[in-house]
Image (tube, grey):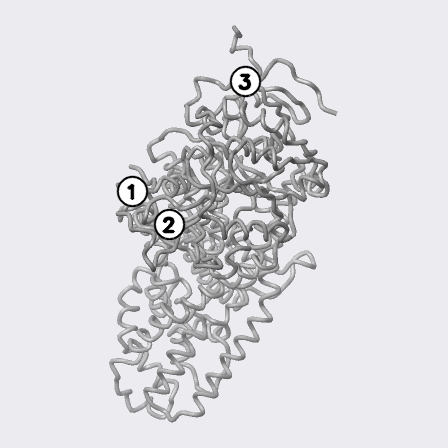
C-alpha cells in the first residue's frame, strides 16, 4: 500500500467528537515511543475517538479499546489515521 | 549522567525453597488503575510493609498471606502497561519478574490482574506476561462494572485460549474473593501457559491475537461513565475547568487554616497546662528546666500542629482518592509542558505538598531521566507539611484575623499565597534546570483519568495516620534530640548575673540566655542575617532548623520559654508578638515576619530530603547543588521581601 504521509491525517488533528481508525504509527518517531503507544492500544486497525481537550488546549483525552488515555499533541502526531473520519453525534 | 535505577548485576545465589524460613513469593502484576492494589490490600490487610530490595531504590509493597499450610509473601509490583521498561519503577517490575530483583530469583507465581472493562487493551499485556513462562493466575477485576455497562464475558473461552486459570472478582465488594483465596491455596499447581498457544512475541500481532479471542469471549460494554462523565463535563470544561481548579486549590488552604486553628488552640492550651503542672511539681533546678524549657516547650511546641498536618493529609487523600488529582494534572499539564515537565512530574510535585520525600520518590514513575532530575531538584520548593507549623505560627501571630470580601480569611489567603509562591518558583526552577541540563531522548507522555470514585475511608484513614505518625516520629526523634541539645546550649555555660539584676528573675534569665553557648552561635551568624531583619535568636532558630524545618518552632518556643516568666502561660505566638529588640522596638515587625516566611518558602532545611536526593540521584553532587542554590534563593528572596515591605508600609 502506498500512501503519501505528508498529507496524512494525524491523531492530534482529530477534534473532540470525531472518530477514526488508526492506519499506522509514524516510523520516524523513536522506537521506544511507538512501542509504548502500541502497548496503550494505538495499533493499526483500532478505532479511536477524541473525547475532550484539556482547558489549556493540550493534552487531549482519547477513547480506544474500552479505555481512555490522554496524550499530548507531540505523541498524538506520531499516530497516522485512515482518511475516513466520521463525525460523532 | 543517568539516574535510572542501576540494573542489578546478577541474580543472588538461589536458596532451596525447602528451607524452613523460606516464604514463597507471589507477585501481582498489572497496569496502573487495574485494581491490583485494592486486591493486594484486601488480601494482606494491615500486615503489609514497604520492602526495600537491595540494588534498586524503588519500594515494592510486600505483605504476608496465611495459607492453610504455611504462608506466602505477596508483592505489589509497580503498575505498568508493558514489560519493556521505560521508567525506573517499570524497571523494578521487569527485574522482579526476570529474577534480578528478589533473592531466590523469579517469584513462584504471578497473579496477572486486569480490569475486565479494558480487555481489548489488557489482553495483549496478559499475553506478554504469560510469555514469561511463570506459573500464573489471571484475575479480572470490575466484573460488576462490565455487566452494569451491558458487557459480557465468557471466562471459559479465555481460560481455554490462555491455558491458565482465569477468575473474575470485584475487589472492593469482596465478590469472588473466596475463589481467589482458594486459588492461592493451590498456587503450587498454577499452570504455565501452554507453548502450543503460541502468543506472538511481536506487539502488533499480539493485539491481532487478542482481538481474535475477544471476538468470541467478550461482548463489549458501553464506554459511558454515567455521573462521572457529567462531573467531568463541568470540572474539565474549557472555562469552568480552570475556574474550578483555582477554587479547589484555594479552598484547600482556607480549610486548613480555618478548621485546624481552633483544634490547635486546644492542643496549645493542653501543652501549656502540662508545662504549668510539671513546673509546679518540681523544685527549681536543672532537671525542672530540662523538662519545662527543653522537653515540653520544644517538643510540645511542635506537637500542637498535629491538627494542621492531619487536615492537610486528609485533604490530599480525598483529592487523590476521588480521582480529582489526575484531573488537576490534566488541567495544568500545558503549564508543566511550558516548564519542560509533564503530568507525572506534576503529580510528584503535588505529593510534595505532604512531604518532599514521597514526592521525590514519586518521580520514579517519570521515564525521562532529565525531567525526573529537574523534578527532584525543585520538589523541595513545594510547601511541605513541615513548613506548616512555621507558617501557622507566624501567620497566626502576625496576620490579622480579618476576612476579605466578607467570607475569606486573610490568614488563609496569606497561606495560599505562600503555597503559590513555592509552586510557581518550583516551575520556574524546573524550566531553568531543563534548559541547563543536557537534553536527552524524549519519552512519551500519557495519562489515564480514572472515573471519579468515593474515596475509600480506609485508604484515607491510613494515609492520614501515616502522615501524623511520621510527624510524631519526627517530634520524638530529631526534634526531641534538637530540643535537648538546644537546652544544653541555652543553659551552659552557667554565668553569674551582675548584682543589679539579681532581684529581677526575668532579667537574670535574659542575662544567662545572652551568655549561653547558643547565643554565641546566634550572634556569630547575626551579621549574615541582619540584612533580612533577623536577630540572633532567629539565627539560633535558623541554625537549628537545618535538621528539620519545624525545629525553628521548638527552638523559638524554648528560647522564649527560657526568658519568660514561669507564671506567664501565654502561647508562643503572643510571646513572639511581645518580643522586643534592645532598643525597645518590636523584633517581629511585618517586614521581618514576611521575610522569615519567604526564607522558609525557599530554604532546604531538611536533612531527610538531602538524604533522599542523594539516594535517588546516587550522587552527593545534586544534594549539595540543591542545598546551595535554595539557600541563596532564600536569602535573596527574604531580602527583597523585607525591603519591598518596608517601602510599601512607608508609602
Residue that label 2 marks: B633
Kindly tell me whether residue B594 is visible in this rendering. Answer: no
| Disc 1 residue crowd, few under 14, some 14–19, many 20+, Cα 10 Å | some
- Disc 3 is placed on an element classified as strand
Left or right? Give the position of B621 relative to B587. left
x%, y% of residue B47? 47, 61
Q: What residue is drawn where x is 41% and y is 32%?
A: B84
Instruction: Identify the subunit bearing mark 3.
Output: A
* Label 1: element kind: loop
Label 2–label 3 contact, CB within 8 A: no
Do badges 2 and 3 share one subunit? no
Residue B310: quadrant of the picture = bottom right
- Sequence order check, earlier mark of 1 and 2: 1
Give how far across and how far down residue B75 sits, in percent. Answer: 44, 50
For label 3, the residue is A80
Residue B292 visible somewhere in the drawing:
yes
Residues at marks 1 and 3, common chain? no
Residue pushed farthest top? A2
Residue occupying the point 35% across, 58% down: B608
Determine whether the residue tagged by mark 2 lies in a helix, strand or loop: helix
Label 2 to label 3, Cα distance in Å? 46 Å
Q: Residues within 10 Å of mark 2 (few under 14, many from 20)?
A: some
Q: Which residue has dot 1 on it?
A: B8
Q: In the displayed orientation, state which residue is furthest to the right.
A: A89
**Distance between mark 1 and mark 3 Cα atoms:** 38 Å
> Of residues A89 and A74, which is closer to you in this image?
A89
Check chain identity for marks 1 and 2: say if they share one.
Answer: yes
Amino acid at each position: 500500500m502506498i500512501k503519501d504521509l505528508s498529507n496524512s491525517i494525524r491523531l492530534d488533528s482529530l477534534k473532540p467528537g470525531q472518530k477514526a481508525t488508526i492506519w499506522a504509527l509514524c516510523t520516524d518517531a523513536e522506537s521506544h515511543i511507538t512501542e509504548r503507544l502500541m502497548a496503550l492500544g494505538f495499533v493499526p486497525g483500532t478505532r479511536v475517538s477524541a473525547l475532550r481537550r484539556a482547558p489549556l488546549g493540550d493534552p487531549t483525552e482519547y477513547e480506544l479499546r474500552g479505555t481512555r488515555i490522554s496524550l499530548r499533541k507531540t505523541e498524538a502526531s506520531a499516530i497516522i489515521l485512515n482518511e475516513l473520519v466520521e463525525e460523532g453525534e | 549522567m543517568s539516574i535510572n535505577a542501576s540494573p542489578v548485576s546478577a541474580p543472588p545465589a538461589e536458596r532451596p525453597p525447602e528451607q524452613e524460613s523460606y516464604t514463597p513469593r507471589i507477585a501481582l502484576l498489572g497496569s496502573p488503575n487495574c485494581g491490583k492494589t485494592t486486591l493486594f490490600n484486601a488480601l494482606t490487610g494491615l500486615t503489609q510493609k514497604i520492602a526495600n530490595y537491595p540494588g534498586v531504590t524503588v519500594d515494592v509493597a510486600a505483605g504476608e498471606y496465611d495459607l492453610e499450610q504455611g504462608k506466602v509473601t505477596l508483592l505489589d509490583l509497580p503498575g505498568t502497561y508493558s514489560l519493556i521498561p521505560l521508567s525506573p519503577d517499570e524497571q523494578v517490575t521487569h527485574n522482579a519478574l526476570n529474577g534480578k530483583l528478589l533473592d531466590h530469583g523469579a517469584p513462584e507465581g504471578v497473579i496477572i490482574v486486569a480490569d475486565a472493562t479494558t480487555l481489548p487493551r489488557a489482553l495483549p499485556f496478559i499475553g506478554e506476561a504469560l510469555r514469561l513462562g511463570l506459573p500464573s493466575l489471571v484475575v479480572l477485576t470490575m466484573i460488576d462494572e462490565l455487566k452494569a455497562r451491558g458487557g459480557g464475558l465468557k471466562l471459559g473461552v479465555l481460560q481455554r485460549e490462555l491455558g491458565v486459570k482465569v477468575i473474575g472478582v470485584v475487589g472492593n465488594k469482596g465478590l469472588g474473593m473466596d475463589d481467589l483465596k482458594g486459588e492461592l491455596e493451590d498456587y503450587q499447581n498454577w499452570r504455565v501457559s501452554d507453548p502450543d498457544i503460541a502468543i506472538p512475541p511481536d506487539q502488533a500481532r499480539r493485539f491481532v491475537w487478542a482481538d481474535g479471542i475477544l471476538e468470541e469471549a467478550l461482548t463489549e460494554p458501553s464506554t459511558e461513565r454515567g455521573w462521572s462523565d457529567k462531573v467531568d463535563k463541568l470540572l474539565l470544561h474549557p472555562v469552568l475547568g480552570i475556574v474550578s481548579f483555582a477554587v479547589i486549590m484555594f479552598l484547600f488552604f482556607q480549610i486548613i487554616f480555618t478548621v485546624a486553628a481552633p483544634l490547635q488552640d486546644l492542643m496549645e492550651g493542653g501543652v501549656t497546662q502540662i508545662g504549668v503542672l510539671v513546673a509546679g511539681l518540681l523544685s527549681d533546678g536543672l532537671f525542672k528546666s530540662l523538662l519545662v524549657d527543653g522537653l515540653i516547650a520544644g517538643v510540645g511546641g511542635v506537637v500542637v500542629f498535629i491538627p494542621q498536618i492531619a487536615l492537610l493529609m486528609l485533604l490530599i487523600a480525598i483529592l487523590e482518592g476521588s480521582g480529582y488529582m489526575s484531573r488537576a494534572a490534566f488541567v495544568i499539564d500545558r503549564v508543566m509542558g511550558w516548564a519542560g515537565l509533564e503530568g507525572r512530574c506534576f503529580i510528584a510535585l503535588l505529593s510534595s505538598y505532604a512531604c518532599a520525600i514521597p514526592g521525590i520518590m514519586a518521580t520514579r514513575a517519570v521515564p525521562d531521566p532529565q525531567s525526573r532530575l529537574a523534578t527532584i531538584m525543585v520538589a523541595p520548593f513545594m510547601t511541605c507539611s513541615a513548613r506548616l507549623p512555621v507558617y501557622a505560627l507566624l501567620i497566626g501571630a502576625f496576620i490579622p484575623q480579618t476576612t476579605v470580601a466578607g467570607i475569606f480569611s486573610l490568614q488563609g489567603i496569606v497561606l495560599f499565597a505562600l503555597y503559590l509562591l513555592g509552586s510557581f518558583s518550583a516551575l520556574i526552577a524546573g524550566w531553568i534546570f531543563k534548559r541547563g541540563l543536557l537534553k536527552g531522548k524524549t519519552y512519551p507522555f500519557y495519562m489515564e483519568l480514572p472515573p471519579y470514585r468515593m474515596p475509600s475511608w480506609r485508604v484515607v484513614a491510613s494515609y492520614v495516620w501515616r502522615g501524623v505518625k511520621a510527624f510524631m516520629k519526627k517530634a520524638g526523634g530529631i526534634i526531641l534530640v534538637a530540643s535537648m541539645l538546644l537546652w544544653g546550649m541555652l543553659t551552659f555555660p552557667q554565668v553569674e548575673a551582675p548584682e543589679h539584676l539579681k532581684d529581677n528573675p526575668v532579667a537574670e534569665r535574659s542575662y544567662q540566655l545572652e551568655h549561653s553557648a547558643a547565643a554565641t552561635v546566634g550572634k556569630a551568624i547575626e551579621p549574615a542575617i541582619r540584612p533580612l531583619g533577623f536577630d540572633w535568636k532567629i539565627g539560633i532558630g535558623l541554625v537549628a532548623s537545618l535538621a528539620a524545618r519545624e525545629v525553628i518552632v521548638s527552638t523559638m518556643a524554648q528560647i522564649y520559654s527560657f526568658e519568660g516568666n514561669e507564671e506567664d502561660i501565654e502561647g508562643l505566638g503572643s510571646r513572639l508578638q511581645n518580643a522586643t529588640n534592645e532598643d525597645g522596638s518590636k523584633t517581629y515587625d511585618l517586614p521581618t515576619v514576611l521575610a522569615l516566611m519567604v526564607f522558609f518558602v525557599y530554604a532546604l532545611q531538611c536533612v531527610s530530603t538531602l538524604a533522599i536526593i542523594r539516594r535517588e540521584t546516587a550522587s552527593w553532587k545534586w544534594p549539595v547543588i540543591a542545598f546551595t542554590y535554595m539557600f541563596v534563593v532564600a536569602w535573596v528572596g527574604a531580602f527583597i521581601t523585607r525591603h519591598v515591605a518596608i517601602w510599601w508600609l512607608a508609602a
